[in-house]
Image (cartoon, rainbow, N blue to C red):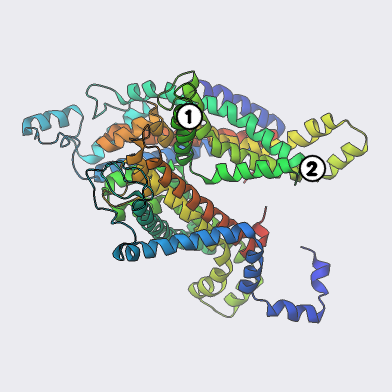
């Protein structure tokens, strides 16, 4: 859990930062951490208000079968919905602070945390595999394109990056399924095709990983290409060439290490996106992760589930961005703090 | 910017520069960009299609997108139905052509909401600065902290599924980007001499913002809007695909993918055609946006 690991990691980073440049950096980090508290609070407040503004109660879904007043009353008492809104909100905040997200409306007697924990492994399987593909492929494409600028390789890489960055991932998913799934199955008489439903550590991973990675790979490749090109023009790189360093050292040590700094910042949001899962990819490929759980919750008006997922996702995104900002300051001493 | 070169312009050159206005100059640059021209042409064709679809249907050149042929479900392509029929026996090509209407309408109307909120917050924060800026930007930060698609889904479930609620939800979630861009530009513009001069002769803030600052940020705003249109079209398609978007039977590309996906094993192009339509639309708008950006604001180039 991030709550267990963060203080140690944070303290270590803080130590490094403070050793390098005192006071101002410490304040910067502290301010950023404290800033997360109101952000998450307002996210909870807004989502809470929205959830209660929605028409209808969670109990009038049972089509055709009207629940008796007594049953509705009992349910409201069980879920704490009989109290005034402000009281419900305070109770909710209190519970969230204790990592208790309440009971799900749609699945009786199931806790929201339990449902989220049940779905997350599937999301992580997909997300982490994709991350392991995105980082090397994206960086490699970008670097090769930059080193061979305006060559055929560069144009092909750029064209792929444009396609990947422009075509929405669920459209890519559908087209992949049609060509490599259904199409390949029909063409080979059912011998050679890629499955497109479910998840596991086997061939079922291939299509969803490609679909979810296309945009991040394109993004990383574009960014790497641009920043490598910029570094290649720097004076110190010319100096490195001039003093006769082998290509391996000039590119590896002087160019790449510096070119990758902006890429690291971009990897943060990508990582957060993969941790929280793609609602749409999970739905297309019938993966029971937290993304598709969320869609089910929205359709069933399961507000505790909707609230918890939104809060959790906002927290993960905010936390990852924070870590990236600190990391940025630590690896690049030129960064000015604002 | 080199100061020495700017100080020594030959007068003939100055005249030449003055004769070519911003828009003409931009058009010249835009015309040279082959991809942008292709993108712009495809966008024009889509708009034309959106307007002409009802006319063609009235002239019986294409089938009624809602008319069902219950005997020939999933019929394959034929002369009268070039893309075949769908799960309810409706003409796929006609639905695809009418689908452009929904997509473009949502894409454009959403930009209206985004411009309304994003411009006013961005201009106010950027021009007045200080406490107002701080307050508005913190508000923007909180808004930004929401996961996009989740927020849209929550809003749609609150508003209920209708065309109106879809574009309200997408607009309410996506104005942050424009607000930030506008604020940044305004912040730097308000320190410039011509704004100071306007202030010195006693122009009101409203007049300065509308007459001096707004025309100068118009380029980036147009570019942001152009990139915002495919974003909104995509979000609508996702919502419809997830079953919380445009309510049936209105043809929407997202809904068509959703319905077609159920037959993916035996009639894959049911989902394939609308997917291709979305892909082409996204590419066209992106090329157009890239071209406009290069043409309207050469400094934004890489």
Q: Residue at x 75, y 47 (%)?
A: A150
- Which structural element holds mark 2? helix
Cα distance, mark 2 to mark 1?
A: 47 Å
| Residue drawn at 65 percent across, 76 percent down | B21
Q: Secondary structure at mark 1?
A: helix
Q: Nearer the viewer, mark 2 or mark 1?
A: 1
Q: Quadrant of residue A254?
A: top right
Q: Residue furthest right?
A: A243
Compare residues B233 and A18 and report the one nearer the observer: B233
Residue A225: x and y in percent read 69, 42
Q: Residue reaching furthest front? A: B79
Identify the residue position indicated by label 1 in the image. Answer: A187
Viewed as shown, does residue B187 lie left or right of A305? right
As drawn, the label of residue A20 is none
Q: Residue at horizontal 70%, vertical 79%?
A: B18
x and y, in percent, of residue A9 in the image: 58, 24
Which subunit holds the residue at mark 1? Answer: A
Q: Neighbour class for label 1 at 10 Å: few (<14), some, many (≥20)? A: few
Crowd tier of the residue under label 2, counting other residues whose Cα lies within 10 Å: few below 14, some 14–19, many 20 or above: some
Chain under numbered label 2: A
- Percent across and percent down for residue A27 are 59, 38
Place of residue A175 in the rendered image (x, y in percent of width and height, measured from the top left): 47, 38
Eyeballing the image, is A210 above or below A202? below
Q: Residue at 42%, 24% (x, y): give it.
A: A120
Same chain? Circles 2 and 1 = yes
Q: Position of A16 compared to B216: left or right?
A: right
View extreme (top): residue: A201
Left or right side of A137 for A82: left
The circle on residue A232 is 2
- Quadrant of residue A243 within the rendered picture: top right
């Amino acid at each position: 859990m991030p709550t267990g690991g963060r203080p140690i990691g944070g303290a270590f980073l803080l130590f490094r930062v403070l050793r390098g440049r005192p006071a101002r950096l410490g304040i910067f980090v502290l301010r950023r951490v404290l800033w997360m508290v109101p952000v998450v609070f307002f996210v909870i407040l807004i989502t809470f208000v929205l959830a209660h503004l929605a028409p209808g109660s969670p109990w009038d879904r049972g089509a055709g079968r009207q629940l008796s007043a007594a049953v509705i009353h009992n349910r409201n008492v069980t879920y704490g919905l009989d109290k005034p809104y402000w009281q419900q909100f305070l109770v909710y905040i209190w519970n969230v602070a204790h990592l208790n997200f309440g009971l799900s409306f749609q699945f009786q007697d199931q806790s929201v945390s339990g449902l989220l924990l049940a779905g997350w492994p599937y999301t992580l399987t997909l997300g982490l595999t994709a991350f392991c593909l995105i980082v090397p492929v994206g960086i490699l494409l970008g670097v090769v394109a930059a080193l061979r600028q305006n060559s055929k390789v560069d144009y092909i890489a750029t064209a792929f990056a444009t396609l990947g960055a422009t075509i929405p991932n669920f459209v890519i998913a559908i087209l992949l399924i049609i060509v490599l799934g259904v199409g390949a199955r029909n063409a080979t008489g059912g011998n050679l095709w890629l499955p497109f439903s479910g998840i596991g550590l086997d061939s079922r991973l291939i299509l969803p990983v490609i679909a979810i990675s296309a945009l991040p790979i394109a993004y990383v490749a574009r960014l790497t290409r641009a920043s490598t090109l910029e570094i290649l023009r720097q004076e110190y790189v010319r100096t490195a060439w001039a003093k006769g360093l082998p290509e391996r050292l000039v590119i590896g040590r002087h160019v790449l290490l510096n070119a990758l700094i902006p890429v690291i910042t971009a990897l943060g949001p990508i990582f957060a996106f993969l941790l929280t899962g793609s609602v749409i990819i999970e739905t297309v490929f019938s993966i029971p992760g937290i993304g598709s759980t969320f869609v089910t919750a929205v359709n069933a008006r399961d507000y505790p589930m909707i609230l918890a997922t939104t809060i959790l996702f906002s927290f993960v995104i905010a936390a990852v961005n924070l870590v990236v900002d600190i990391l940025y300051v630590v690896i690049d001493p030129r960064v000015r703090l604002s | 910017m080199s100061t020495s070169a700017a100080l020594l312009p030959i007068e003939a050159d100055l005249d030449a520069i003055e004769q070519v206005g911003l828009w003409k100059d931009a058009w010249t640059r835009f015309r040279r960009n082959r991809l942008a021209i292709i993108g712009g042409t495809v966008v024009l064709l889509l708009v034309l299609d959106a307007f002409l679809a009802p006319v063609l249907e009235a002239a019986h050149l294409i089938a009624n997108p809602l008319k069902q042929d219950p005997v020939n479900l999933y019929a394959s392509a034929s002369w009268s139905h070039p893309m075949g029929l769908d799960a309810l026996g409706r003409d796929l090509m006609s639905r695809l052509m009418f689908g452009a209407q929904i997509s473009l309408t949502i894409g454009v109307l959403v930009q209206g909401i985004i411009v309304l909120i994003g411009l006013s917050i961005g201009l106010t924060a950027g021009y007045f600065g200080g406490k107002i800026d701080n307050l508005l930007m913190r508000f923007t930060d909180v808004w930004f902290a929401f996961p996009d698609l989740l927020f849209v889904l929550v809003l749609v479930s609150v508003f209920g599924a209708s065309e109106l609620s879809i574009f309200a939800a997408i607009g309410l979630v996506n104005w942050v980007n424009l607000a930030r861009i506008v604020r940044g530009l305004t912040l730097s513009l308000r320190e410039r001499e011509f704004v100071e001069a306007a202030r010195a002769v006693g122009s009101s803030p409203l007049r300065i913002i509308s007459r001096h600052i707004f025309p100068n940020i118009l380029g980036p705003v147009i570019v942001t809007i152009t990139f915002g249109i495919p974003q909104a079209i995509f979000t609508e398609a996702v919502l419809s695909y997830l079953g919380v978007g445009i309510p049936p039977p209105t043809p929407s590309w997202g809904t068509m993918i959703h319905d077609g996906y159920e037959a993916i094993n035996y009639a894959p192009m049911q989902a394939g055609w609308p997917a291709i339509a979305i892909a082409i639309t996204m590419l066209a708008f992106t090329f157009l946006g890239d071209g406009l950006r290069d043409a309207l604001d050469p400094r934004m180039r890489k």
